[in-house]
Image: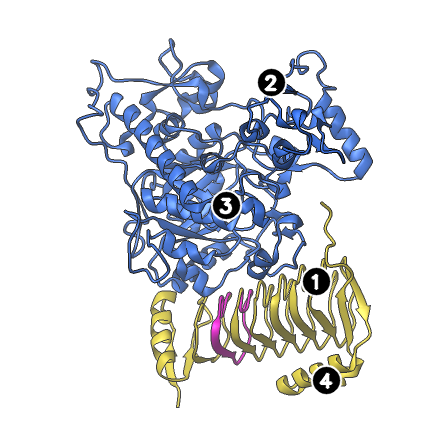
Amino acid sequence: MSRVVDAKGRDLQSVSQELREAAAQDAVTLRNADHLHGLAAGMKSGEVTIQGDAGDYLGAVNDGATIHVLHNAGRYLADNMTQGTVIVDGSVGYGAGAYCYGGTVVVNGDAGDFAAVMNKGASIIIKGSVGDEVATYMLAGDLVIGGDAGQNLGNYLIRGNIFVGGAWQSLGHNTQVQELTPADIARLRGLMEQYGIEGDPASFKKIVRLSEKPFYN
Amino acid sequence: MPPVNGTFCVTVMKDRCINAAMPGKCATCVEVCPHEVYAIDDEGNVRVQNYNACVGCRICSEFCPEDAIRINPAESEFLVRWPWTFPQVEEIHYKAQTGHYQLRGFGTMGSTPGFDNITVVPSQISSPAPRDKYREECNMEVVIGEGRCENPLRLHYPFIFPAMSFGALSREARMALAIGAAQTGISSNTGEGGLVKDETWLIKGYENETRTLKRWNPGGYLVVQWSTGRWGVSADFLRAGDAVEVKIGQGAKPGMGGHLLGAKVTAEVSAIRGVPVGTDALSPCRYYDVLEPDDLKHMVAFIRDVTNYKVPILFKLGPSRPYEDIKACVEAGADMISIDGLVGGTGASPAIVTQGVGIPTVALIPPAVRALKDLGVHRKVKLFVLGGMRNGLDAYKAMAMGADGVGFGAAAEIAMGCRACMACSTGKCAYGITSQEPELRARLIPEEAGNRLANFIRATGEELKILSMLSGHDNVAELCEEDLRAMEPNIAAITGLKLIGYERRLPMWDHLGG
């Protein structure tokens, strides 16, 4: 049994307070929270399931909690997360997984532009397609895209790997396509099995940086 | 362009120079000069190899054990060769040879509208009588976030050490700022470089990390910065602060992100920032997670939530459109706003940006104050002014124009020992303030530098107190425009202050009343 928190008509502070207290005791189911932005921010532990849609900045600065959205989530999902897991069954808006240092973000649908921007170490898995400028200035971590990507994918990539199952419109600066190694395939297969991504990992393309120091100075 | 190269004469007096008498026995000047003015040959002879590189910082002169070096300004060619002065010619050659533009730190050089053409009006008989500086008290405290969060900041002086990151500064300099703040009850700001662990207990005045023995009172406040690069930011980082500052821009490079050159990205800096060693850490110029005005409001809301509604939220602005920008910060939920002027800028920046982009500090204050007044939050949402602040006189003028306090960035570096050689971005700071090299860092003793900072703040506070009391105030929050006069029409036009002699505001300000 999980405890239920109903956010209908309530503000962020009151819902957050109840959510944190409840999550310290038990798993929590949150309802009617789509009007709230910045929910479940900075939590160090706990399991939160959100019925319905979620607003922007869900799970921002997450530091260990597991957050599961049963429908769609807004923009900036798991912004600046350091640890934990954020799973969205539907699609998400702009900037999913922006600035993350660690943890795992899983989006079962599509993600908008600028997903994984400045990713510094998280595993970000988008089963569907993504928009433009995804993984801009990514510094570490993995980004797995099951579907297609838009323009300028991986622009100024510094470190980390981007795996793409579909096609992309264009690659950004400082990127190159590299052959998958057996280790890559094994790791990708593990992630795909864990998060239910269909397909053959060997058919994915891997994008890495060209230079570690691409900036003019 | 900056009037630096080729405008100083370097003279080494051979009768005093140890090296001249005994080649190989001394090469201090070679070692300390950040601009390679001096060179040493295989036989140990020191010579001046590049007169044109001297920027007049006089570090060589200070370090010379025999006081054998004289640095004097050369005859100004700016009067006779403009616009093709030597620095301009050199800059074009540099770009032509390298394909790179010039970078430097330490803000705008040369003359811009400033506080110097404003004078303080003392009390005599027609205004409230002066207060006795020696026998009466003057309240200097500024409270930030009162009624808006659980733990407002209560600064003992209306001063802050503004954001200067670990990476840009050495670990020792960050520790010194914490010690200086702890002794004077003011705040120090992490900047966007993450947290140096020792800062968290030093700034509270503790002897060591066990936090059992208090060494310095009253203890200061640590401001942690949330910026566009988000280096080293986590929930724990936010909760480690006594306030969180949302950085929008800075004086050195408004409209650009932070720029830490690869030379300063050591293993330690790399570990905090998450960028590879030796790679430039270039922060984005804008937030990738703010697309619309309401986003900033939501961002502030969740930062408040993460910090459990305990600490104030501050904003840092570069010098752009102060009226509109200040309003946007207030609407986003700011408890305090720092606005940095054109002259400000301890950070590395393209020279053309630091020299020619933004509004001078003095011109930011009137529209910023007007914005706060129009929103009915003047003196509630605090306004701090940064950029070229040097002493209590500058602080007084800024505060009489409506600011609640001022920040000392470059002045704090100078208080630690810096001589404004402008080589901060290279990592070759001879005083170990802006260097990551162990042998240079070893020259900066945090406690000594912290004591110097505390002395600077106390002395500057006394200056502010003198001026406040001679103009009839026993509380710095009472300072007002009537305490100032503009000494020439341009500054009267820019600030709306009464012009000396005319004793009124210029007619162009009539539409604003007052």
Which residue is disc 3 drawn over? B164
Distance from label 4 to label 3 (Cα)? 44 Å
Cα gap from disc 4 to disc 1, whole angstroms: 28 Å
Residue wearing tag 1? A132
User: What's the chain of the residue with tag 3?
Assistant: B
Instruction: Give me the chain letter of mark 2.
Output: B
Q: Is residue B325 visible?
A: yes
Chain letter matching colour blue = B
Q: Secondary structure at mark 3?
A: loop
Query: In the rendered view, would you say A169 is above or below A144?
Result: above
Instruction: Residue B106: give x, y in percent of width and height.
Output: 56, 35
Q: Chain of mark 1?
A: A
Residue at mark 3 shares a chain with residue at mark 1: no
In which quadrant will I find the C terminus of chain B?
Answer: top left
Depth check, front residue: B421 or B410? B421
- Check residue A59 for magenta coloring: yes
Which three-letter amino acid code belongs to the residue tagged 1? Asp
Q: Secondary structure at mark 4?
A: helix
Q: Residue at x 73, y 28 (%)?
A: B49
Marks 4/1 in contact by CB < 8 Å: the verdict is: no
Of the two numbered discs 4 and 1 on the same chain, state the one appearing first in sequence.
Answer: 1
Horizontal relation, residue A28 to residue B131: left or right: right
Q: Mark 4, mark 2: which one is toward the viewer?
A: 2
Colour for chain A in the figure = yellow
Relative horizontal placement of residue A29, taking residue A94 as reference (left or right)? left
Closer to the eye: label 3 or 1 = 3
The amino acid type found where label 4 is placed reads Ala
| Residue B497 drawn above or below residue B294 | above
- Check disc 4 and report the residue beneath it: A186
